[in-house]
Amino acid sequence: MYNVDFKTDRSIDLIGIGRLCIDLNADQFNRPMEETSSFTKYVGGSPANIAIGSARLGLKSGFIGKVSDDQMGRFIVQYLKANHIDTSGISVDQTGAVTGLAFTEIKSPEECSILMYRDNVADLKLDTSNVSEEYIKNSKALLISGTALAASPSREAVFLALDYARKHDVVVIFDLDYRPYTWTSAQETAVYYNLAAEKCDVIIGTREEFDMMEQFESNDNDDHRTAQKWFSYHAEIVVIKHGSEGSIAYTKDGSSHRGGTFKTKVLKTFGAGDSYASAFIYGLMNQWEIPKAMEYGSASAAIVISKHSCSDAMPTTDEIDRLIAEQKVKK
Ligand SMILES: Nc1ncnc2c1ncn2[C@@H]1O[C@H](COP(=O)(O)OP(=O)(O)O)[C@@H](O)[C@H]1O
Ligand SMILES: O=C(O)C[C@@H](O)[C@H](O)C(=O)COP(=O)(O)O
């Protein structure tokens, strides 16, 4: 069994920190964005999606982030509130920054891409004065996402949140969430990702994301070696995702578990990772064994990739339980 200790005397289960954005998902499928004429607006941003997903499953979620002082920022906060997420840790930018936009292109179920508009975005303006030690102290877990490390002052805000979390025995979960266009160089990215990962209890990422972090080492895409590296720091669980091939989770006690996938009618591929993470974290917080938490993650992902949005499509426990009951996971 893994050794991740969620303190029970805390009023919030999970606090996400970082990106609160807007997804504009193409209404016309199977065509390039040049030929797309309309988009539907949803709340987006990987840590926001994960917080929403975990709240749908019944966790008490909160968020530390910064939104623009305009209609988009207010839309995000209203949506989070409507989804029972505590927004007291969200501040409003006063410098004229804007909300980041992610336009999604669905050329085919296998060929999806995201075009991000992220100049002068409010989420990266989060600063250390916006991070409350008291708020973090009252939480069982803190979820960080790599994109918030891409620039100052958000980078320092995340490192401060990490320090508070360590100081108060708050479990730190790192979803790597590597978005190259937010960073200036691959070397800078790897250095900051590695510094943050050293402090985390649970690390979740795709093989490609771990490869980016290992660019100064020669690891040859070896999942086992990746996990061992993080066990020599603070990690107790390392999950490496392999898209439609499933995932593998390692625990510090030397065990590994392969996670399969569920059959689904894929509409688009984005959102898989965020829905997987929210349901996997839900499983951990319920003290489930790793294979059961992974099965929940995979089922949640199968549901979200069959739907149009990421955040709004996050399933309830009933929807996930139904899918698991209908299907045996494919390994
Ligand atoms: N085509 C697919 N069919 C079924 N499940 C999928 C598919 N693609 C991804 N998943 C599920 O979602 C999880 C995360 O997907 P992945 O693409 O690796 O993450 P990300 O979205 O972060 O790149 C996988 O481990 C798997 O369980
Ligand atoms: O993270 C973003 O800013 C965009 C997301 O809201 C988007 O929908 C997405 O890319 C989800 O990412 P994934 O779960 O890693 O596929």
Image (cartoon, helix red, strand yellow):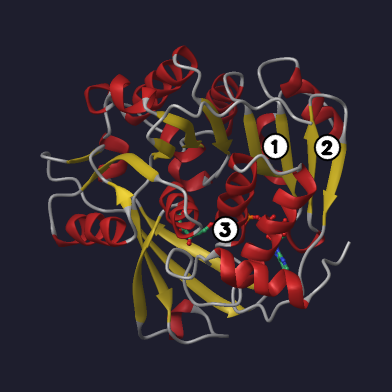
Q: Amino acid at mark 2?
A: Asp
Q: Nearer the viewer, mark 1 or mark 3?
A: 3
Q: Are marks 3 and 2 in contact (CB under 8 Å)?
A: no
Picture layout, residue 64 above or below residue 138: below
Quarter-wise, where is residue 128 in the image?
A: top left
Residue 223, labelled with which disc?
A: 2
Q: Residue furthest top?
A: 167
Identified by mark 3, the residue type is Ser
Which of the 4 image quadrants contains residue 63?
A: top left
Q: Is mark 3 within 8 Å of ligand 2?
A: yes
Is disc 1 surrounded by few (<14), some (14 to 19) or many (20+) residues within 10 Å? many
Mark identifier at residue 210: 1
Task: Give 245 or 15, whichever is nearer the viewer.
Answer: 15
Q: Tell me where residue 52 appears, x and y as whole percent.
A: 42, 56
Quadrant holding ligand 1?
A: bottom right
Residue at the location (89% across, 61% down)?
Answer: 331
First of labels 1, 2 by sequence position: 1
Tell me the element at label 1. helix
Relative to 14, is 49 above or below?
below
Q: Position of residue 290 (x, y in %)?
A: 76, 43
Apparent side of residue 203 relative to residue 50 in the rendered image (left or right):
right
Q: Is residue 119 left or right of residue 26?
A: left
Residues packed near mark 3 inside 10 Å, few (<14), some (14 to 19) or many (20 plus): many
The image shows residue 11, relative to residue 258, as above or below, that is above
- Which type of secondary structure does the marked residue at label 2 adopt? helix
Rounded to the nearest whole Å, what is the CA distance between mark 3 and mark 2? 22 Å
Residue 275: which disc? 3
